[in-house]
Amino acid sequence: MYLGIDLGTSGVKALLIDGDQRIVGSATGACDVLRPHPGWSEQDPADWIRATQEAISGLKASHPAELAAVRGIGLSGHMHGATLLDDRDSVLRPCILWNDTRSHAEAAALDADPQFRAITGNIVFPGFTAPKLAWVAKHEPEVFAKVRWVLLPKDYLRLWLTGEHMSEMSDSAGTSWLDTGKRAWSESLLAATGLSERQMPSLVEGTAPAGTLKSELASSWGMGAGVVVAGGAGDNAASACGMGTIGEGQAFVSLGTSGVLFAANGRYLPNPESAVHAFCHALPDTWHQMGVILSATDALNWHAGVTGRSASDLTGELGDTLQAPTGVTFLPYLSGERTPHNDATIRGAFIGLGHESSRAVLTQAVLEGVSFAIRDSLEALKSAGTQLHRVTAIGGGSRSAIWLSSIATALGLPVDVPADGDFGAAFGAARLGLVAATGADPLSVFTPPKTARTIEPVAALREAYEDAYQRYGRLYPAIRAAY
C-alpha cells in the first residue's frame, strides 16, 4: 500500500492506494485560515499536524490492515508558504500562506532586480516565499534574526514525519530562490533577501526518497519499519502526477480555491512578462507552466455566503443549458490577481447591474468571470509558446457541468471530464510515494485516467462569449484606475 498526504488550505487529505493504484480509502482533517488583517492569510503549522493525525486516525479506524501495509508515503501541499523555524525547529510565527498579499511592496522591489526573473524564470509575486521573508526582515526583525530554516508547508510535515529538512524541485520553484533551469538554489537570490543556502532544505526530485517515517509514528499508526517518504510535489504538480499530465502538450484546468491552467513541458520555457509561472515538474528533467487565478471556487463560495444559499443551489438555478452572457460582468479579483495582471491590490467587482439583475444573473456572471480569468491564462500560455488543444478538468468546481460548459466555451477548447475516481493531489502524492519506494518507472505509473465525457464549446455562443470576454478585458484597466 502507498499513502498520499495532501496539505490543502482548508484541510489535510490522506489517501491509500494499492500496488495497482486502486484507491483503497481516504480520510480528512480540517484546517482553519487566520486573517488577522486585510490581505493577510496565515496558518498555525501545529494545525497541519493535528489535521494529519485526524486523517490518519480516520484511515486507521476504517482500513487498519491496509494502513499497516504502507511502504511509501508521498507529500503534496499548498505552495509558497513561509514556515520559519529556529535552530531547535520551533515555529517562530504563523506560516504566511500563498494567498497572503501583505508583501506586495517587497515583491515589487525584488522583481525590479533583474536577476530574479533571469534566474527563476518568473515574476516575483507577492504570494511567493522570498518577498514574505523580506517583509518579515522589515517588520519583524526579531523573528528574522532567529530564522534557521525556511520550509514550505508540506516540507514542515516532512520534518515532523521524518526529522529531515528536505524539499523538492516543483514546490521550491515557487519560492523565487530557485534557479529553475538548473534545479538548484541560487545563492545570489538568497543573499538578496538576507539569507543563505544553509537556511534552505536540501533538494531532491519529487520521485526520489526524502526520508524515512519516524519509528514512533510508524508504531502509533500501525505501520512497519522503513516506510519511505518521497520528495513529493507542490499541489499543482502533484495533481498533474495524479492526472498523468507529464508530457508535452498535456494540460488540465483546476477549479479549486484558486484556479489553475497547467501545461506540462519537456523543456524549460520561461516567459515572466506574461505572468505565467514556469516551474520544475515533480519528475526529473521536466518542467511545467501555469496560469494562476487567486479566486475560483472561492469566488462562488463568497457569492454563496453573501446570498445565504449553497454553491450547488446557486448553480442549480441556472439549469442545465449554458445561456448567453447577460451583460453583467464579474471580476473575480477578491484577493488580487496573478495571471496576467500580477496585481495584489486590485479587488473584484460586478459591472452592468440593473433592476432586472436577479440572483441567478449574478451567479451566471460569477461563473463567467472565473471562466474569463482562465481564458486570460490561456492567452498568457500562448504568449509563452504553449499551444493547447484540449484540457482535463479537476477540482471541486469541476462537478458543475454548467461551469465546465462555460469554461469550454470561453477557452474554445474541449474539456475532458475524468471517469469517476480521485485523481487530485493526494492521488498524485500516493503515486510519488509508490515510485520512491519501489523504483518503478514514472512513465508507467503516471498514466492519465479514462475520460467519462467531453464537454465541447457551445458553438452557438462563441460570438457572444467572445464579445463578453473582450468587455471583461477592458474592465481591468478601468477598475485599476480606481485604485
Image (tube, grey):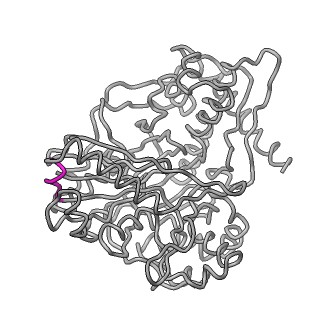
Q: Nearer the viewer, residue 429 or 251?
A: 429
Q: Quadrant of residue 28?
A: top left
Q: Nearer the viewer, residue 249 or 447?
A: 447
x, y (%) of residue 409? 54, 27
Residue at x 38% of width, y 30% of height: 417
Does residue 45 appear left or right of residue 66 in this picture?
right
Q: Nearer the viewer, residue 207 or 228?
A: 228
In this view, 63 is above or below 369: below
In this view, 360 is above or below 389: above
Specify start and end residues of the magenta stretch as a single range.
66-71
x, y (%) of residue 111? 66, 70
Q: Nearer the viewer, residue 389 or 107?
A: 107
Does residue 102 appear left or right of residue 69 in this picture?
right
Residue sitting farthest toward the right: 482
x, y (%) of residue 365? 67, 27
Q: Quadrant of residue 368?
A: top right
Residue at x 59% of width, y 46% of height: 293
x, y (%) of residue 83? 51, 69
Does residue 432 appear left or right of residue 181 in this picture?
left
In magenta stretch: residue 104: no
Residue at x 53% of width, y 27% of height: 403
